[in-house]
Image (cartoon, helix red, strand yellow):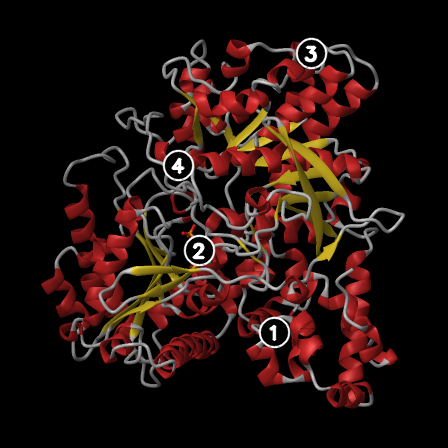
Amino acid sequence: MNSLSTSKLPRRIEGLNELAYNLWWSWHTEARELFKVLDRPLWKATGHNPVRLLQQIAPYRLVAAAQDPAFLEKYDSVMGEFKAGMSSDRTWLNKEYPHLAQHSIAYFSLEFAIHNSLPLYAGGLGILAGDYCKEASDLGLPMVSIGFMYPQGYFHQQISVDGWQEDVYHELDFNEAPITRVLTAQGQAVNVEVPLDARPVQVAVWQVNIGRVKLYLLDTNVENNPASDRQLSARLYAGDREMRLQQEIILGIGGVRVLRALGIEPAIWHANEGHTAFMMLERVRELVAKGMDFAKAANKVRATTVFTTHTPVPAGNDVFSLDLMEGYFHRYWGSLGLDRDAFFSLGVQESDNVVFNMTVLGLRMADLRNGVSQLHGGVCRRMWHCLWPDVEEKDVPIGSVTNGVHVPTWLAPQTARLYERHLGHDWLERHDDPALWEHVLDIPDEEIWALRRWLKYKLVSSVQDRSRKRWAEGQVAPVQALATGALLDTETLTLGFCRRFTDYKRAALILHDVDRLKRILQNELQPVQIVFAGKAHPDDERGKQLIQEVYNAAKDPEFGGRIAFVEDYDMHVARYLVHGADVWLNTPQLLQEASGTSGQKAALNGALHLSVLDGWWYEGYNGANGWAIHQDIESPASPDSHREDAEELYNLLEEKIVPLYYERDISGVPHGWIRVIKEAIRSNVPLFSARRMAKEYTEQMYLAAAQANETMRMGASHPPRILDTSHTSNDASETPIPPSASVSTHGTIQIEGSE
Ligand SMILES: *Cc1c(COP(=O)(O)O)cnc(C)c1O
């Protein structure tokens, strides 16, 4: 086991070890403080990683802490809260649905973003999975999660002087990560075997504690495996299609085997995106091995499976050529009781007989299906109508559960203190209750303004700190100091655009008319600055070109240092940006943003959303809580929409946003601006929280799956098929997708579509 030498920790505070290995600390401010006060510079130097901190800290500091009454008081209070947080008697689930507590929920995802010390994510999909696990812990959902242990994770980004993204990989030191090896009762490492075509691959398992939730990470870097297989799980979204297929086989099939090896019998299985859908096949195989025929086994599996799809863009769907599939599954399909054609029919669309589509497999093998916003639910029903040709589009059985963010994770500590002062000390326990947030209207404007100024100061100084560090490394040209934010200013209206760089997100939309933008940014009395951040997928040339375009603008002296590109966007950078920006900018092509979550994090801290009316904003915008571009969803595909959207964006900035921000009273407080902030917090925070989302998954999906499981366990010969969508928030009657919008499911480019 990867534990610290506890002998180093004084007895009185030895609980710090357990705390360091449970990422519960990461969303509890007091727990973070506890590690931080042990040694502030080291806390920063270790990237806020308590495991590393405890390994590297000078022993005398620990001894001193163990004798310091102020520290001990904090320590006892945090440990008390931690213990209470780990027991499950007083959770929401236990109060509302105690019978569900007996059923474990297995949650599969290719990415998990929990904290930067465990870099197992690329972007939005991983953030969603991480936030969901934390909320599951807070609510007491009996969840176990399955993912991959990538020692090199996703790449780190550096931008060259000519604006080109360079991908750099760092090897994670497992000893410094909050993971432990999973052992059997006899103390042996748990290992399962997964066949990749003819050869067996050994899979080892690591455990991460996320509060009450356990995340099991699969790792193929095992001694007995040949070198190529040991590398299989090295990186996320790297390598070719074949490697990706191998990863998905390991995750889906291996994930089920790991749960069995650990003696866990989930009643509910939740697949987060198509990457994980092979887990459905493996469960069918198990039943067929016990003598059931395929049809019956498949029905059983479907009734207990939830499938969440995140991709509204055809290119984002995960597909494999039939040749490739055949190579890996020709031995497997017999064990499902299927022949070649029947097997392929699970993942092939009638209309498009060339590829095996993981989204199609997920939709066919799960009875509970959803998109991730109301608008996206409608897009999915249109996109996948072909799979249910006999029903009307509005009756296609795909519902929606809108994404939300984990409030304690994305809240700045200062924002939390403000809410605590004005909403009551138990506000966090009630944060999905809209009534609670009515009280935001009573907070004095001056306090909100003081918070906003502080958060922007933190943003600007952290960006400049990074810029200075890169400078000190000595490999950057002077103009790169300008491009990375050296001249940002703390009093200037600040827009944040931070997301994956890929065509449909249109990072360069705001650069459409460079002269007009220069006038806006360089206005002497009412200046504006923009902070960009985001990675492009290593294979996404177009995404890299967009970065270059933005970076070159940031270098252009005529913008006067008012555009900055922050390298290596990750959770840590994201926190500063979503806290400190005044306006959060989002300009995707309409109907292509499934949900988006960064704007929800921003709203939580009083940063206002300026976005195309897409994804969650279609539900979130009420006319008084931010700004919307392209409100006419009837014309999503107009050939000129790029120009039109850009002009609308400039008009909003020039006529509404900039003047409102700079309209101050005698002490410099912008009351009109703060009115919008209060309205954004009041209307958005309770609805776009992971708490509301997790309760919806529970009430609309898990209860049905648990009931189906129970019915089957009692020996009913046919599981109830859940075909109607009335159980989900499928607002079919109000499907907002215009009749003219066409969505296609064809596409061969393989660019990661994970939000
Ligand atoms: C929240 C977040 C995302 C997702 O943002 P979108 O709004 O969906 O583009 C991606 N990356 C990081 C690091 C985040 O924190």
The first of marks 2 and 1 along the sequence is 1
Question: 670 or 413: which is nearer to us?
Answer: 413
Q: Position of residue 428 (x, y in %)?
A: 64, 61
Which residue extends farthest left? 515
Crowding around mark 2 (Cα neighbors within 10 Å: few <14, some 14 to 19, many 20+) is: many
Q: Nearer the viewer, mark 2 or mark 3?
A: 3
**Residue 663 visible to an observer of this rendering:** no
Q: Dot 4 surroundings within 10 Å: few (below 14), some, or many (20 or more)?
A: many
Q: Of helix, strand and loop, which one carries label 2?
A: helix
At horizontal 50% and vertical 16% (from top left) the residue drawn is: 344
Q: Quadrant of residue 53?
A: bottom right
Which residue bears the numbered disc 1?
421
Q: Which three-letter amino acid code belongs to the residue tagged 1? A: Arg
Q: CA distance from mark 4 to mark 3?
A: 32 Å
Comes first in the chain, label 1 or label 4: 4
Residue 483 visible: yes
* Residue 198 horizontal/vertical position (percent): 61, 26
Q: Earlier in the sequence, mark 4 or mark 3?
A: 3
Read off the residue under disc 2.
Answer: 598
Q: Is mark 1 within 8 Å of ligand 1?
A: no
Q: Nearer the viewer, mark 2 or mark 4?
A: 4
Of callouts 3 and 1, the N-terminal one: 3
Q: Which residue is mark 4?
A: 316
50 vs 496, nearest the viewer: 50
- The answer to whether mark 2 is within 8 Å of ligand 1 is yes
Label 4 beta carbon within 8 A of ligand 1? no
Q: Dots 4 and 3: beta carbons under 8 Å?
A: no
Crowd class of label 3 (few under 14; some 14 to 19; many from 20; radius 10 Å): some
Q: Tag on residue 296?
A: 3
- Up the image or down, 390 lies above or below 127; here it is above
